[in-house]
Amino acid sequence: MSYLTTITRMWLTRSFKPWTFTNENDNFLDFGELDKLGLYIHIPFCKSICSFCPYCKEIYEVEKCNKYIESLIKEIHLVGSMHVGKKVVTSLYFGGGTPALAINSLYKIIDAVKEHFIITEGIGVELHPNDVRIDVLQELQKIGVTKISIGIQSFQKKFQSILGREAVDIQYLKSMLNKFYFETISIDLIFALPSQKYEDLKKDIDDAFNAGANHIAIYPFINFSFLNSNIPVMNNNEKKILLDRISNYCLNKGYVRNSIWTFTNNKKAKYSSMTRDNFLGFGCSATTLLRDQFKINTFSVEEYCNRIDNNILATALTIRFSIRQRMIYYLFWTAYSTVISKKNFKEFFGISLEKMYGIEMKLAKKLGFIIEKNDTYQLSLKGCFYYHYYENYYTLAYIDKMWGYLRNNPFPKRMVL
């Protein structure tokens, strides 16, 4: 598994050097001149811990959450003040954890953000199904949230049981969503669960749209090693058949595919904190992507607060990209949207995509992974599956190792991937 990702990485970066992260902690982040900059804020608290979820989180405690919010606001001011004036950004996303557990403090966080940034494409918040209530939705609208993403995972009891989730009342969900307008109402579903069939996933998709969603995300189940999950993994052939069939079903229904995993019945409905050229991350485990570097904050809530309270960024690891490394990172997450723009690549790097990766693009076309259309390369159904296939390898070879290590080491000196 790691052999495949290593060989691919060496070829695409034209280097034998591994991805090396160090404990460098910058006192200044140079984001002032970056275009299409996004923001992400992590709230790491949950009322209960889902066994399948790999993200940084811990059990909610009122005092700990309040202390964390204070530190989070300090971090926003610390970073925001590095740029003179207000910086125009695209979007702000809250993830977790369960951000709605801090519902009465979200307005303070957003106010702090708006002291330094001008948000042009809206604010998104992840919700647990239990958060879809009148009081929560009213407050979200009041503070300017325009997008919500609800982590349903499945409406069916047999899969809720596997995932350790409670039953969802679809009619109640629908009645709540009908009462409030959000530009995007996204519902997260999981595919490739044990014994999951096409009919099962199709029903979940139909139920999601019928409940009021205008956007769905169908994420693959990935068995992270540090979770010690006993959920069996579906084999690749079954996954390919399932993904192809459900993709065709959505496309035949007239839904628009706007990423590998997402479909919408409204072209304006978008929800993605990943497909952004650059972004600043606030909170424990949050990541920051700038033109020449990638940073990840400590996973420890306590150590995060200690650092920020001493006016020191809580960076756990930093990688300084070579130009080829940055190009591969850019292409990987741009391909997630299923469309790679030659024009955008050249604007970002100042050199044509064909000059840097012409051979690879020709090979991908010949293999049927991509289709060249006007000024873009678009992933075919085959390309979408193999993106998933490689993303699974990448996740287990890199993200699994990093997140697993950071869960137990707040500030490691070095990590080589």
Image: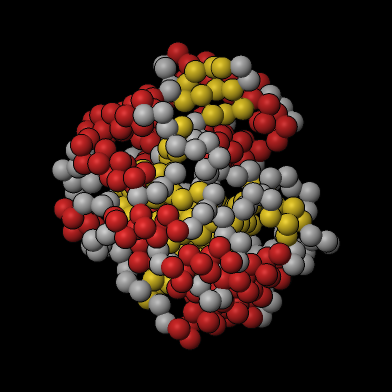
Q: Is residue 144 left or right of residue 28?
A: left
| Residue 381 image offset from top left, x and y in percent | 38, 25
| Residue 50 image offset from top left, x and y in percent | 30, 64
- Asked whether residue 74 is in view, the answer is yes
Foreground of the two, 208 or 86: 208
Foreground of the two, 253 or 369: 253
Check the image and name the residue furthest to the right: 84
Residue at coordinates 40% horizontally, 60% vertically from top-left? 176
Q: Quadrant of residue 383?
A: top left
- Asked whether residue 4 is in view, the answer is no
| Residue 142 image offset from top left, x and y in percent | 59, 66
Q: Is residue 94 above or below residue 338?
A: below
| Residue 272 image offset from top left, x and y in percent | 52, 47
Q: Is residue 224 above or below residue 355?
A: below
Residue at coordinates 68% horizontally, 70% vertically from top-left? 112
Residue at coordinates 36% horizontally, 29% vertically from top-left? 253
Q: Quadrant of residue 115?
A: bottom right
Check the image and name the residue furthest to the top: 366
Check the image and name the residue furthest to the bottom: 63
Number of numbered callouts drawn? 0
Q: Is residue 204 above or below residue 281?
A: above
Residue at coordinates 27% horizontally, 59% vertically from top-left? 169
Quadrant in the picture for the N terminus: top left
Q: Is residue 101 above or below residue 124?
A: below
Colour scheme in the image?
Answer: secondary structure
Foreground of the two, 345 or 27: 345
